[in-house]
Image (cartoon, rainbow, N blue to C red):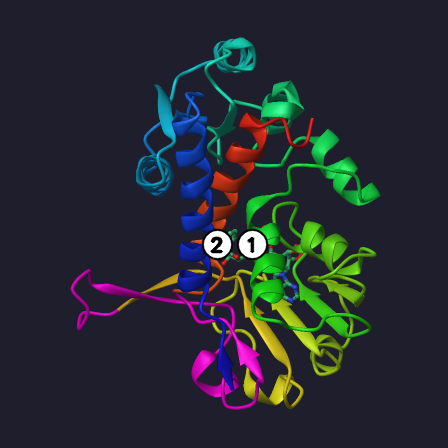
């Protein structure tokens, strides 16, 4: 059984981008700049934005954070988006989700210039992805594809079962896995809460991508012998034996399933570290006008 080491692969990708950024600076060009907009005080969102800032710094990119109060109106947030769309210093930006309930997320995402939409959530980028055209791909699905590619996992002709149809993970990864590309060319089944005989469907997977948001939902008896298992889930479980008072687990029962899988991503250290690496990659591409 092979552990797909997302931390290691993410570090490789960040090193590659760091070299590319250093080459830009050596050539007297500007370092790529990522901006983030954070509305409100949600602690998880603050942590994510801080890690994105630190990651930029480590690879030589510049970054800025626009911290707006919880009471920011939709109109004020749209004005910030307009400002960032125009600011030539900013190559790409993200609006950290979730937004406070009084703001329409779709409206905000649609206001972002697709050429600066490094989260890949704008309908234009998602549409281009669907059509196999150059696009900013959403970070987590893109990270999963990179994990498969860089771990030499053959996806062609395989049956891939995706558990969960969210707009940020399940649905886009199902599209990428079925695209005429490498990795891709898989036969994909997308499962959700209305799927009949879910366990039987999961058992037919050569490649299982679990993004269901249910702690350790996937058990060994649901998984085919030698399946490749990608665990997207992240759950905090109280654990007083740990310094932080908790540990992280996924949507897959790693202990059991790792004995049956041919390759599996751990949690933590699997899909998670890839997400920021892919955001940095998109920012670099935005700075070089590689997509638009
Ligand atoms: P989400 O929006 O919570 O959606 C969950 C999906 O699973 C939905 O499509 C839902 O079906 C389906 N589902 C829920 N319970 C089910 C059941 N019992 N049987 C079958 N299907 C079921 O998911 P998400 O945002 O994609 O997140 C999934 C997990 O990934 C979470 O643990 C999240 O924290 C984690 N995540 C990790 C990363 C990372 O960087 N590693 C990034 C994003 C998310 P319906 O559509 O029918 O409701």
Q: Is residue 184 above or below residue 217?
A: above
Which element is circle 1 on? helix
Establish whether ligand 1 lies closer than 8 Å to the Cβ of label 2: yes
Q: Quadrant of the C terminus?
A: top right
Residue 163 coordinates in the image, percent (x, y)? 66, 65
Instruction: Kindly identify the residue that appears in the image at 58 percent across and 34 percent down.
Output: 285
* Residue farthest front in this picture: 27
84 drawn magenta: no
Q: Residue at x 63, y 84 (%)?
A: 223
Asked whether mark 1 and ligand 1 are closer than 8 Å, the reply comes as yes
Q: Is residue 180 left or right of residue 46?
A: right
Question: How would you rate the neighbour count of disc 1 (Cα within 10 Å): few for under 14, some for 14-19, many for 20 or more?
Answer: many
Residue linked to disc 1: 143
Which numbered tag is attached to residue 274?
2
Let me know if residue 23 appears in the view: yes
Whether tag 2 and tag 1 are in contact, CB under 8 A, the answer is yes
Work out whether mark 2 precedes mark 1 in sequence or the reverse, and give the earlier one.
1
How far, Cα to Cα, is label 2 from label 1? 5 Å
Q: Place residue 206 in its image quadrant.
A: bottom right
- Tell me where the magenta segment starts and ends, as one range: 239-268
Q: Secondary structure at mark 2?
A: helix
Q: In the image, 265: left or right of 11? A: right
**Near-viewer residue (180 or 194):** 180
Does 84 sit above or below residue 280?
Answer: above
């Amino acid at each position: 059984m092979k552990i797909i080491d997302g931390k290691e692969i993410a570090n490789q990708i960040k090193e590659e981008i760091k070299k590319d950024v250093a080459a830009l600076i050596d050539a007297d060009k500007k370092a790529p700049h990522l901006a983030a907009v954070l509305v409100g005080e949600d602690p998880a969102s603050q942590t994510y934005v801080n890690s994105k800032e630190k990651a930029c710094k480590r690879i030589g990119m510049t970054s800025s954070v626009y911290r707006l109060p919880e009471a920011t109106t939709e109109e004020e947030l749209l004005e910030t988006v307009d400002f960032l769309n125009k600011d030539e210093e900013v190559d790409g930006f993200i609006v950290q989700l979730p937004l406070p309930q009084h703001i329409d997320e779709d409206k905000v995402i649609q206001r972002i210039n697709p050429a600066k939409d490094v989260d890949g959530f704008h309908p234009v980028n998602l549409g281009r992805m669907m059509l196999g055209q150059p696009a900013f791909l959403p970070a987590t699905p893109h990270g999963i594809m990179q994990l498969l590619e860089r771990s030499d996992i053959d996806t062609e002709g395989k049956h891939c079962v995706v558990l969960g149809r969210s707009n940020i993970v399940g649905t886009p990864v199902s599209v990428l896995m079925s695209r005429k590309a490498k990795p891709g060319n898989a036969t994909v089944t997308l499962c959700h809460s209305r799927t009949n005989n879910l366990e039987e469907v999961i058992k037919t997977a050569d490649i299982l991508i679990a993004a269901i948001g249910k702690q350790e939902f996937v058990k060994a008896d649901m998984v085919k012998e030698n399946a490749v298992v990608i665990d997207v889930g992240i759950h905090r479980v109280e654990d007083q034996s740990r310094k932080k008072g908790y540990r992280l687990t996924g949507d897959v029962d790693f202990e059991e399933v790792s004995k049956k899988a041919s390759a599996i991503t751990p949690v933590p250290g699997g899909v998670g570290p890839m997400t920021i690496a892919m955001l940095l990659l998109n920012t670099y591409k935005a700075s070089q006008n590689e997509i638009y």
